[in-house]
Amino acid sequence: MGEQTALQLPTSEDLISEIQFAYQDGKIWLDEQRMLLIHSAVMGSLRQELIASLGLERAKGFLMRFGYQSGMKDAEFAHKIRPEISTDEAFLVGPQMHCIKGMVRVEPVALEFDVDKGEFYGEFNWFDSYEAEVHINDFGIAEDPICWTLLGYASGYCSYYMGKKIMFRELQCAGCGHDHCHIVGKPAEEWEDQEELERCLLPDPIIEELFALRYEMSTLREHLKDNRISNDAPLFNSVGQSEAFKHVCHLIERASSSAVTVLLQGETGVGKEVVARGLHQTSERSDQAFIAVNCACIPPDLIEAELFGVRKGAYTGATQSREGKFERAHGGTIFLDEVVELNPRAQAALLRVLQEGEMERVGDNQVRKIDVRVVAATNEDLAEAVKAGKFRADLFYRLNVYPVQIPPLRDRAEDIPLLIEHFLEKYHTMYNKKTLGVSDKALQTLMKYKWPGNIRELENMIERGIILSDNNRTIDMKSFFPSLNEPTHPLNIAQSGVLQNQHTGDGDEDIVDQLLGSEFDLNSFEQTLLERAMDKASGNVTQATRLLGITRPQMAYRLKK
């Protein structure tokens, strides 16, 4: 019986040394087996087409069988490289090959097996599953585990090793919104639903059903799309599927059936006006006017006239009477962004509208009845503004009847791929261009970026990426972060795709202090560092830049200097 006690993968040098890139011949070899490098996005497209054509269950079976055969092949390779099949180190070739191929990072949790007795139990954690990533990008968060190819691989690999059917199941899956995937494997007969699990590995006679199935799936997709639009995204022109986003949608949907005043709170750039428009479009007022006003953009001495109108001769320059924003919004909705910027007189007039449903134009004494739903927004804390004497307490209480907190983009990261697709479509049309979307590494970086400017920053970044990219080209990282190519830029992109400071950590500060405490020559130190990197990379500039953790433009700048 083998038992993994340290739960650590052994070194991978013996496996990696078997990979050969015979690019002159157009071949990649793993031992004597020909391999392929395929974009994960292409696998995602295949997955999308299979689901659309075959349906979810049949696509699952197809991909599990695909993974199962791949696992069998790698088990055959493992038996050749590490012939001692009964040892843990030999067995763990499978999880290591998962990592080497870029499919998923595997962390063994528990492993017990006896080849002679046919006993097996394995538990593994999966991190950064490519399959979960492409599924979320195309379909969003799934209800059931979706790492089908990876499950098939694990089952095929272990079945070859054990000489009997071993089946794995995902108990949690990143594709369902979990932090990582967790799988358990044991002999097929030990699973209660053995027949259902093994059915996925049986050949599928599909040809005679294909045309009928296509029609059924087309109808089903339209039905699901209509339900998703009506149930999950009631906001007009809104994009998202995260729980935080759905919570906001739920609150707005509840408010839309009444005339309640709504206060939208959140950081700048989170999309408060989009939410306000969504509220208006889903209300009974949707056929009336929606008027948006940014109170911070209007001079304080004009804000009252802009909002409530003015009577002719009320002040110098008022050559004719005119209605204000509230009268134009009569019967509909007015959105007051940055409401905290209203001056005291405008605050008093707004309070009267909310309490009495009436108003007067500046310089006029005629009381006008007004029917307007007020949606106010601010990125400041109005309660603090009240304490500071900047905002009326009674107006705050009237606005705060139905507060809605809109989450920042960093708290709804799973919506980023959907938002990217939305903005790509928008700016492809605007600029009459068609890119191939976002590169994998750029998407990874965008997913991990903290977004201080929220959705507005993301939209601006996508627009810039499209402008800087040629037609039918993928938008790469430097198109999103062009300033990172500057040698003096304080940020760097780590191998994981995370934006980070180049100088962080107490250990770095200690080293710097030691260097500065000696007769330190920065130019000489930099020259030595560049020479060592170039020597280590055998003169290959690209490899040297990787060793130093800088970009090629940064390297070129330093070499020239």
Image: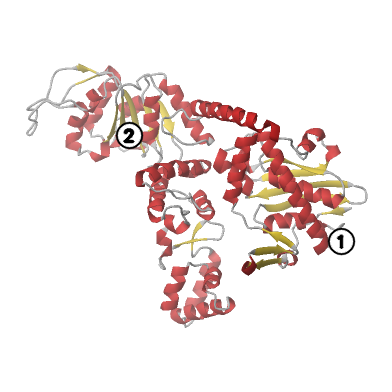
Depth order, front residue of 31/463? 31
**From mark 2 to mark 1, how far is it between C-alphas?**
74 Å
Q: Please tell me in which quadrant of the rendered image residue 184 appears.
A: top right
Comparing 393 with 352, the one in front is 352
Residue appearing at x 13%, y 19% in the figure: 365
Question: For the residue marked with disc 1, what is the amino acid?
Answer: Glu
Q: Mark 1 points at which residue?
A: 84
> What amino acid does circle 2 point to?
Val
At mark 1, the secondary structure is: loop
Residue 468: image location, x then y, percent: 39, 56
Figure quadrant of residue 87: bottom right
Marker disc for residue 246 = none
Q: Residue 386 carries which label?
A: 2
Pinpoint residue 231: horizontal percent, then vertical percent.
51, 26
Across and down, in percent, residue 406 comes to 44, 36
Q: Can residue 27 be seen in this view?
A: yes
- Within-10-Å neighbours for mark 2: few <14, some 14–19, many 20+: some
Q: Residue at x 86, y 61 (%)?
A: 84
Location of residue 401 (image quadrant): top left
Quick one: quadrant of the C terminus?
bottom left
Q: Residue drawn 31% across and 35% down?
A: 337
Q: Tag 1 or tag 2, which sits nearer the N-term?
A: 1
Q: In this view, does 30 lie to the left or right of 49?
A: right
**Residue most toward the right?**
116
